[in-house]
Image (cartoon, grey):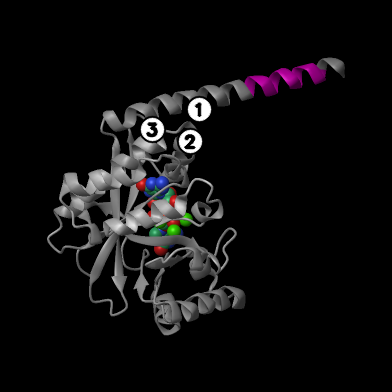
Amino acid sequence: AKRNGRNRYEYFTLEMDVQARTRRCMENDLREAITENQMRLYYQPITNSDQQAIIGYEALMRWHHPSKGLIMPGDFIPLAEETGLIHSLGAWALYEACREAKNWAGGQAVSVNLSPIQFKNSALVSVVEDALRGSGLEPWRLEVEITESVLLDDTLGNIHILQSLKALGVLIALDDFGTGYSSLSYLRSFPFDKIKIDRSFINDMSDSREALAIIRAITGMSRSLDIQITAEGVENREQFDKLKEEGCTLFQGYFFGRPQPSELRLTML
Ligand code: C2E
Ligand code: CA
Ligand code: CA
Ligand code: CA
């Protein structure tokens, strides 16, 4: 029994060792990814309720790894956040999104996701400023998406950073609303331009009264606060019709279009 126990212990340490090595390897790869030009932004259309026009795109990061192929953000953003590499990745994304959007004939807006970790860098505001100035993109065509965790703890002055970004003329959206700690009181701490209702609520809407009730609470409140509501993850006509009825004004999801590289992005519905 003692022998077995020891073997099991060795087995676990070996496994942990493999994990640690895989992680280190991935971290090194990630470090090179930007300089080696392996990162891409894919753009998913955002449409208004008339479904007439694409008014903007959300930039979503993809890693074209030389041997592993396409890696989705869920598989490298957490590591980038833990290692601090998100600062350079995030700055790259801001610059790249502004540069590509500047070339869009339709003049649509571009939304860029900001990690809460990026708020720990006091230079964040000048990073955004540099992206705007370097690309020549008009500030109102840039929107940043943040999650409520940015508001949860303001010891670093995150609200002040958001105010500075807004002063540049950039729009601010609250992403994944309804998940996490979400409380309507967050909406009083900062004048957001948009709220994005998390995909999970849209997904559950048809068979969950709770999900629908939350969507109603958000849209009801937005009317009095003059905030636009984006429904994320709209996958079919039924959801689209229902969400329009409930007062959502902006829509994003596979029903309209999937994220694509700038040159292949959907430009008409
Ligand atoms: P998110 O910001 O909530 O982005 C929306 C995600 O939902 C994207 O996944 C998008 O491809 C997916 N999606 C859009 N429409 C539909 C739909 O109709 N059905 C379904 N099932 N999914 C849909 P993606 O691209 O894998 O990104 C995942 C997350 O990774 C993002 O969630 C965001 O939190 C993070 N992320 C992506 N790019 C960046 C980035 O440049 N910087 C940072 N900090 N995070 C990023
Ligand atoms: Ca987002
Ligand atoms: Ca989201
Ligand atoms: Ca999300």
- Residue 243 lies, in percent from the top left, at 43, 78
Mark 2 surroundings within 10 Å by alpha-carbon count, few (fewer than 14), some (14 through 19), many (20 or more): some
Viewer-closest of 52 and 111: 111
Tag shown at residue 68: 3
- Residue 116 lies, in percent from the top left, at 47, 47
Task: Say which quarter of the image contains residue 170.
Answer: bottom left
Q: Mark 2 points at which residue?
A: 79
Secondary element type, mark 2: helix
Question: What is the CA distance from the residue labelled 3 to the residue labelled 1?
Answer: 14 Å
The quadrant of the picture occupied by the N terminus is top right
The reply to whether discs 1 and 2 touch (Cβ–Cβ < 8 Å) is yes
The quadrant of the picture occupied by the C terminus is bottom left
Q: Is mark 3 within 8 Å of ligand 1?
A: no
Name the residue: 60% across, 20% down: 17
Front: mark 3 or 1: 1
Name the residue: 45% across, 23% down: 25
Tag shown at residue 173: none
Secondary element type, mark 1: helix
Residue 66 visible here: no
Residue type indicated by callout 1: Arg
Residue type indicated by callout 3: Lys
- Residue 57 lies, in percent from the top left, at 28, 60
- Residue 177 lies, in percent from the top left, at 50, 64
Viewer-closest of 123 and 228: 123
Q: Give the range drawn in magenta.
A: 4-15
Tag shown at residue 23: 1
Viewer-closest of 247 and 243: 247
Question: What is the CA distance from the residue labelled 1 to the residue labelled 2?
Answer: 8 Å
Residue type indicated by callout 2: Leu
